[in-house]
Amino acid sequence: MDDQHEHGTNTRLAHTEYQAPQGFSAFSCGIHHASTVLFKDVAAMRARSWQEKTSYTYGLHGTPTSFTLEAKLAEIESAKHCILAPSGLAAITLVNFSFLKQGDDVLMPDNVYGPNRDLGIWMHKQYGVMARFYDPMIGAGISDLIRENTRLIWVEAPGSVSMEVPDVPAICTAAHARGVLVALDNTWSAGLVFPAFERGVDIVMQALTKFQSGGSDVLMGAVLTRDEALFQKLQTTHMRLGFGVGMDDVYLVLRNLPSMKLRFDAHDRSARELASWLQARPEIQKVLHPALPSCPGHDVWKRDFHGAAGLFSVLFDTRYSEERTDRFVDSLKLFGIGFSWGGAHSLCIPYRIEQMRDRWKEKGNLVRFYVGLEDTQDLIADVEQALAQL
Ligand SMILES: *Cc1c(COP(=O)(O)O)cnc(C)c1O
């Protein structure tokens, strides 16, 4: 402050002279909020590079809080680079807008996350990007679908409603032979039980809204890669779209991250128990859980994965009408009815799967379970009483 005259109240409110002492240390990461980032002088401002994560430019490109989460996620997924986005869907959008332009072709599995399918159809109408949908169990056969202008193939392992486990390495080999990029929606595995980059994937997308947040209260997404050139494209698109994230939300994810593996394993154990129990029930025609042989792609899951998330589906016996399976869902007391998953609370939701897919041959109503952290025996007892309402 200058000594010429006493500053007025407004100036003093804005310019605090107090500086907290250096050397504070704690396990928690500070929540650094900023739109404006200050430079020490004009030369420092001119020398800035928003692409470099060794310094700071503007809140949109990150603060120490978001850089910390990005670094942690990259480490868990064995990636080199990570970019945060305001939701899982924003992360998907970031991938599509980074690698597709007018006249390009993108292949998506028929069981792709619904809003990504919708985005593909919209990109076709609005931006002249052709989106085609393939059988998720196609494996190496994807080769026959690749065209001159195919740029990107999406994979989802497994599909988050119908749970087919695709042969990701076979799809990657076929794609790379023709110079096509492969992007994986790795939300189900949370970067924990499917080593995506080792299996050949170029770009991983995760909805941090699920297991990373773990609280059913945050929306966020991430895109990860090992490739420098792909990262630069993603970073430029991220800047152009203005996909900033709120640092309070980043902090919430950071806060729950240390317990993610323990939670994931607990969801896995409990879901497998419930899935096996359901398999023995006469009301259930088929359990679609990757760890059970009845799930399409179970052998691929055994070969490529070392765990399962707490999310699976069942097909009810064809003798039950939608009205009756809806009554089952309504009768559950411990399972909430709602979208998304990854939190402590169990969820259950019916899907009109035949309306979501180009090809769906199975019969029977599909109901999806997300198994939270409640005691498994209580969840089984709840499902048992709801089955009695059928
Ligand atoms: C939830 C989810 C998304 C999208 O995440 P949001 O944060 O809800 O936008 C994408 N893919 C899969 C498989 C998901 O389950």
Image: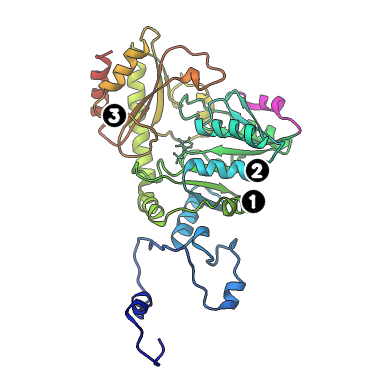
Looking at the rendered image, the quarter that the N terminus falls into is bottom left
Instruction: Specify whether residue 80 is in view.
Output: no
How many C-alpha atoms fall within 10 Å of the one at disc 2: few (<14), some, or many (≥20)? some
Q: State the separation of the CA atoms marked 1 and 2.
A: 8 Å
Closer to the observer: label 2 or label 3? 2
Please rate how many residues cluster around mark 3, counting C-alpha atoms within 10 Å: few if below 14, some from 14 to 19, many from 20.
many
Residue density around tag 1, few if under 14, some if 14–19, many if 20 or more, within 10 Å: some
Q: Amino acid at mark 2?
A: Phe
Q: Would you name the residue on which mark 2 appears?
A: 99
* Callout 1 amino acid: Lys
Circle 3: residue type? Phe
- Is label 3 in contact with label 1 (beta carbons under 8 Å)? no
Q: Is residue 356 above or below residue 219?
A: above
Q: CA distance from mark 2 to mark 3?
A: 39 Å
> Could you tell me what secondary structure mostly forms the magenta stretch?
helix
Q: Which residue is mark 1?
A: 233
Number of residue marks:
3
Q: Disc 3 on helix, strand or loop? A: loop
The residue located at (32%, 13%) in the rendering is: 324
Residue 373's image quarter?
top left
Numbered label attached to residue 335: 3
Instruction: Where is residue 289? Give x, y as percent.
Output: 43, 25
Are the residues flagged by discs 1 and 2 in contact, CB closer than 8 Å?
yes
Q: Quadrant of the C terminus?
A: top left
Give the quarter of the image for residue 323: top left
Residue segment shown in magenta: 138-148
**Does residue 323 appear anywhere in the picture?**
yes
Q: Residue furthest bottom?
A: 4
Indicate the position of residue 5 as horizontal and vertical percent values.
37, 91
Name the one closer to the observer, 259 or 347: 347
Find residue 185 and report its horizontal and vertical position in percent.
53, 37
In the visual, does 371 lie left or right of 222? left
